[in-house]
Image (spheres, helix red, strand yellow):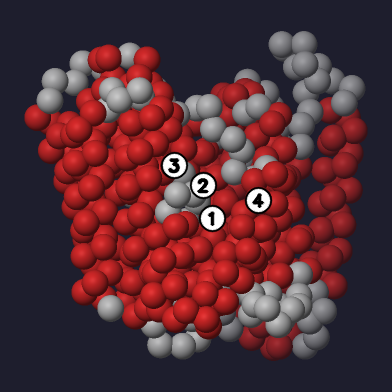
Amino acid sequence: MQRGAIVTTLTHTGFVAWLIIVGLGFFFGLAYEDFNARTGRRRPGGVRSFPLLALAGGVLFALDPAPPLLLGAGLAVLGLWLGLYYWRGMEELAPDGARNVGLMAPLSNLVAFLIGPLALAGPFWMAVGLTVAATLLLTARETLHSLARGIDLAEIVNAGRFLLITGLVLPLLPDRPVTTITRVTPHEAWLAMVAVSSISYASYLLRRYVVPRGSGLLVAFLGGIYSSTVTTVVLARRAGAEAQAVVEAQSGIVVANAVMYPRLLAVILLFNPDMALALAPWMLAVGAFGGLLALGWYRLRDRKAAVPPIVNVSNPLGLGTAATFGVLFVIVSILASVTMRIYGSSGLYTLAGIVGVTDINPFIVSLATHGAGAAPDPVEMASVLIATGSNHVFHAIYASVYSRGKTGAPLVIFMALMAAASLGAAILVH
């Protein structure tokens, strides 16, 4: 390469780019120095070495960008030196008796070297993101180790299941109907299960690892995101066993039923954005109405105890849960298609009222997928609201049965008001 071409290559990105490279290297070096000070060990690299490494990587890339042979040679030399350091470190002992070696030092030097090429080859946010991510991982050593020690093996298995059903199984399923009975494809059926399970799993993790015990209505709120039916049963049982938990159980059950509306809207939005936007004002209004009822009752009555945390819930990513949802989704989808074809809107309304006795997610997702790509159908929108209203009625029955009548008339009145509001919205929508 000619001398003039080299100068042009080194300066075409501008002086500011090189300042950013030096600044990012210096920032990462500060975090690395703090990391070494906390552990009390001496490792190569720091506030002087990292800016130089970043500059060296940037210069090697700028001199020979396509293909970056010089950068590859620089990486080989750096890798050889880091390998020798690691090999020597295996033979040395730190003052505390541990081996004076670890992967963080070689990896940090490698990251510092790559800051320069990344800043020149792509947008600056990539280099900034790499530096910030590496800094956070470096400085959060104790926090991350504590988190790792506090997570059960079962939760790691659950996370693996989530990656399996979303990243491996979902892309492999065909996105075309396999029968003339229903238009639902295997891909849509599995996607529906993934959508509902993902929301429940997020609530499950928040409730288990983030929300402290005895957090009042917040626990019921997260329980409603997981499953309003499960939350209703758990709180009703607690009210039947402990008299001081009745008011909290009443308010918590109403909250769990109120939060059902934004949860369902999020699922509908994934399959039919037009229907979700058309239903949003009505469903959010009913949900807000239920929330106000719960808060008002909670503040008016004496509340010495907190809503008990809901911990005895099944894993939302379990294979049994997934299979049950998938079967229900297909069955309800077929029933909705056949009912609408034979009996028209009145038959669909009747089916919507009946499914309220159980999990209404498969029915509502089925309606959303049936109408996907078309203008929102008032009949299907009204059926969604009828199903939610019917679900409130059955939740009131569940609460009375599982609490042995301890939840009393107030909860029945609240649930009846929410059911009336949902059915009233259905009438207005239609």
Q: Circle 4 — which element?
A: helix
Mark 1 or mark 4, earlier in chain = 1
Amino acid type at circle 3 is: Thr
Q: Residue under circle 4? A: 324
Q: Residue under circle 1? A: 196
Amino acid type at circle 2 is: Ser
Q: Position of residue 27 (x, y in %)?
A: 51, 48
Q: Circle 3 — which element?
A: helix
Front of the two marks 3 and 1: 3
Callout count: 4
- Image quadrant where residue 178 sits: bottom right
Q: Position of residue 221 (x, y in %)?
A: 35, 41
Q: Residue 229 has which mark? A: 3
| Quadrant that contains the C terminus | bottom left
Mark 1 and mark 2 residues within 8 Å of each other at the beta carbon: yes
Vertical comparison of 405 with 182: above or below: above
Q: Residues within 10 Å of mark 1 (few under 14, many from 20)?
A: many
Q: Circle 2 — which element?
A: helix
Cα distance, mark 1 to mark 4? Answer: 12 Å
Q: Residue 200 has which mark? A: 2
| Quadrant that contains the N terminus | bottom right
Mark 2 or mark 4, earlier in chain = 2
Frontmost residue, 28 versus 337: 337
Q: Is residue 332 visible?
A: yes
Frontmost residue, 28 versus 239: 239
Mark 3 or mark 1, earlier in chain = 1
Frontmost residue, 158 versus 100: 158
Judged left or right of residue 209, residue 382 is left
